[in-house]
Image (spheres, rainbow, N blue to C red):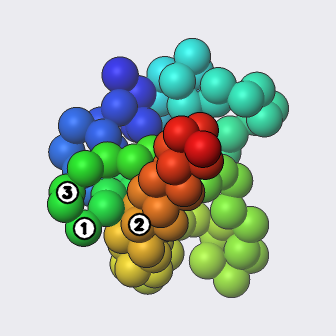
Amino acid sequence: MGVTGKAIENKKVVIAPKGELDSSFAPEVDNFSSVGTISNMMAGPMINLNGDIMGVVQLFNKESPEEDNQITQRDQEELNCILVSLGEIVQSANSKYEFTKLC
């Protein structure tokens, strides 16, 4: 299931502070694009206004020396703030694509 699966299942942001060393990390899902070593990770579902999951945002390898390169509560809050907007953008793009296919 991995970090990404937990984010989808719970419809909320999930953090793996130790990245690929975290017990919930699943490389086949959480590192699908083979980005290399993942030292920390945050994943959150893009949800439209109807509550449908439109996709997942994965953020890897935060680098911030003043925060010991760790994902913070503020990072999580900021991601939460944009997830619904991203869900609506994806929904709109999907709708436009479906309309274009019909023409």
* Residue in the image at 57% along x and 65% along y: 70
Q: Secondary structure at mark 1?
A: loop
Q: Nearer the viewer, residue 96 or 80?
A: 96
Q: Secondary structure at mark 3?
A: loop
* Residue in the image at 31% along x and 47% along y: 53
Residue type highlighted by circle 2: Glu
Q: Position of residue 62 (x, y in %)?
A: 68, 62
Q: Position of residue 103 (x, y in %)?
A: 60, 44
- State yes or no: discs 2 and 1 in contact (Cβ < 8 Å): yes
Residue type highlighted by circle 3: Gly
Q: CA distance from mark 2 to mark 3?
A: 10 Å
* Residue in the image at 40% along x and 48% along y: 54
Q: CA distance from mark 3 to mark 1?
A: 5 Å
Q: Label for residue 49?
A: 1
Single out the residue that lies furthest toward the right. 36
Q: CA distance from mark 2 to mark 1?
A: 7 Å
- Residue 49 lies in quadrant: bottom left
Above or below 47: residue 86: below
- Residue 74 lies in quadrant: bottom left
Q: Closer to the N terminus: mark 2 or mark 3?
A: 3
Visible in this render: residue 32?
yes
- Please give the count of numbered marks on the rendered protein: 3
Q: Secondary structure at mark 2?
A: helix
Q: Label for residue 51?
A: 3
**10 Å crowding of disc 3: few (<14), some (14-19), many (20+):** few
- For disc 2, the marked residue is 88
Above or below 99: residue 87: below
Q: Label for residue 33?
A: none
- State yes or no: discs 3 and 1 in contact (Cβ < 8 Å): yes
